[in-house]
Amino acid sequence: MKRLILLCACVLIPSQALTWSYPVGSTDIGVNGYLEGLGVYALDNDTAKEDPSALLSLTAKADFATWGAFKLTLKGDYDGKIHDPSHDRVFAPIEKVYRDNTPALTLDEAYLDLFTGKADLRIGLQKFAWGRLDEFNPTDNLNTEDMTDPVLREESERKQGALAVKADIYTDIINCELAWIPRYLPYRLPMPDERWFPPVLKVPDAIETNSVFGSVPVTATYADIDLPAFTLDNSEAGVRLSRSIAGCELSVSYFNGYDNMPVIAVPTELVVELTDPAALKTSIQGNLTAKPQLKRMQVYGLDFSTTLGGFTIRGEGAYFKDKYYVRTAESIYPEIITTKLQQELMEEFLNTFYATGQTRQSFHLDPAVAIKKDALKYGLGIDYVRGDATISAQIIEERVLDYDDDKPIYFIKGGYDTMLSLAYKQFFLQNTLELNLGGAYDYTFHHYLFQPSAVYGFTDAIRATLGVVIIAGKDPNSLLGQFRDNDEVFVKLRYSF
Amino acid sequence: MKKRLLFGVLGMFTAVCLWPSPGVCAEALSAYQIVKKSEALMDQAKDSKNEMLMTLIDKRGNKRERKLLSYAKNYPDGSKKALIIFEAPADVKGTSFLVWSNEKKDDQQWLYLPALQRVRQVTSSSKGDSFMGSEFSFYDMGTRNLDKNTYKLLKEEAVDGQACYVIESIPNEAEFYGKVVTWIRKENFVPAKMQFYDTKGAFLKEGTMTKIISIKGINTPTHIEMKNAQNGRATILDLSNIQYDSGLSDDIFTQRYMQRGR
């Protein structure tokens, strides 16, 4: 009932958009935001369901002097994807990867701007926007993302504020953006029972050893991340230099910090127990703890945009040094739980039993799930506008250098993953009706995502979206294929003020 | 020689505000000379700033409003820069559009969407498209070469009791309009009415400019209506807080200004 009330609130609020401004001394604080309701109907019966969600976003901004301004965005949400919510805290835990409290408040951005003639300084929780491609920006690694709904949430909504100091320096020759993030805040993953928890990160029910141990049943624990100590060495930094040359806008960038894609360690306890001493019959149980790890990397980036005839061309690429990838589960355990190891463990267990009479023994394994590689990510986009229609097409590719076929990693095949995306937007009725046909095709895995939607503006303040998400793929180890059972219909209602 | 399009969005929001002062004698002038003289007088202000209320009206009479801030500046080399910032409705607040026009090159245009926090370079070849759902086109926002049109003085005719020259303008190479007919007031050279025809020769839309006020000696229409005959829709622009030659800084016409909104 509470959820229904939240959704209805989105509809019942007066349809006329308001502008709020509050004078504080000689400064006007402008307040705006939106209230949004989201309903999702899962089309596949055997996937996690999602209750209606509601989100209130409030932004306060003020120019308090010619040399300064501030912005604060606070979001309060009821997240229908969380199945068994806790209510132990009001604010979402920004130091955690997993969040189970809802409703909750989140500080999305909170920063102070200081302006001078040739340089600007921004201090606080903020979002960066490096690169020029849509949704996929190899050079943009300063912000972490909320991955609890990777499809319906747009890039700007997925991005989480970084605690940072940013300096923009403007010269006649080049513009320089310097960023320093003294304290890393982690990405957010859905809870393991949530609809968009990445299946590739899900611990399997059993480990197939095909040998002495046979199929080992597994219990899983999902631990949260340990943040690095608050030291200078653990801070992140980046620099981006930009300039325009003959109508072509160019940027080069460098980033040294943590990889924002999840890397999971899986420390494993193999518990051997003698169930029938007379017959020396044993049972084996695996206890796995999936724990997110932070890995540092360096990224050297380049991006550009220009116009050519009626087209806008955008490109972006980056070289990743020391990037960690997650190996496929099925390739790890046969490698470490070899027949020889199993025989040795069983021999040790029996020796201990004979020596001490102990009928239960644990063996600790720490499989190398993450593998360090250098990689390239690059893409090219093209936009074309004709009348009330816009078409954007992109090709993006990830290439892992020195790829080892014997150690396969998720989302990559033969060292490559190539994705094509297409976004078509058509306005009707003086921009009150918007039709979107968005899709992506993974050329490497032959998987695709299709996401048509229609947006109707009842007024300037109230817009409704109705859409479908269809994902098809056979390989569960691909980026799209892992979500192949997550087809859904969604309806979204937003009131902006 | 370039001519700011009479009924452009930026042209309307800014250039129209730079229309010639009254009392200019146009006797014995040809159509080309009238337009050329208008253009010269039009550009007498170095810069302009104003607020705009854009009202979009659909064919059923339903209205939607957009509030905008407009800045424009002319440079000695003939180039022009203009910036439009959306103030309302709430879901587009902070969106801005920057145009650099230079007669020797294609226009350079950038769009800033606050949600993305990115300034995006956009192509200048989509100028025939509607600007934010209005009956004004992106093409109307830029500049066009006066010499790439052929002008003909059709007749003299009164509009709302004011004597006007009726001038036909036909582009040598039809792009978005096949023909434009302009009624220019004889008294002050401010256009009273314009009729646009598409490239097939069919009547497309008509604009009227009224509520003229004098600011720093420049006659400025503050109420502009554009009615599209083909789709039944209309757009009304109401200009306010118009300022000329206020010494706008070059820093306004930059991506930096778009991003920080000040």
Image: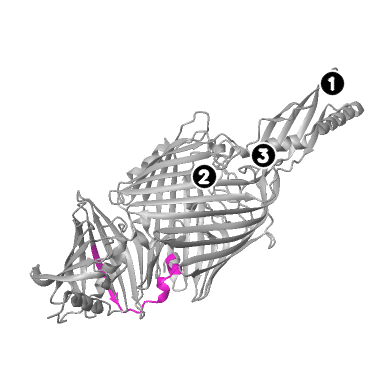
Q: In the rendered structure, the residue with mark 2 lies on which chain?
A: A
**Kind of element beneath mark 2:** loop
Quadrant for the N terminus of chain A, please: top left
Tell me the magenta residue range: B237-258
Kind of residue at badge 1: Leu
Which residue is the extreme one toward the front?
B172
The residue that mark 1 highlights is: A280
| Residue A292 visible at all | no
Q: In this view, does B199 lie to the left or right of B26?
A: right
Q: How crowded is mark 3: few (under 14 residues within 10 Å), some or many (20 or more)?
A: some
The mark that comes first in sequence, 3 or 1, is 1
Q: Closer to us: mark 3 or mark 1? A: 3
Name the foreground residue: B9 vs A393.
Answer: A393
Q: Is residue A110 left or right of residue A465?
A: right
Q: Are marks 3 and 1 on the same chain?
A: yes
The residue that mark 2 highlights is: A150
The mark that comes first in sequence, 1 or 2, is 2
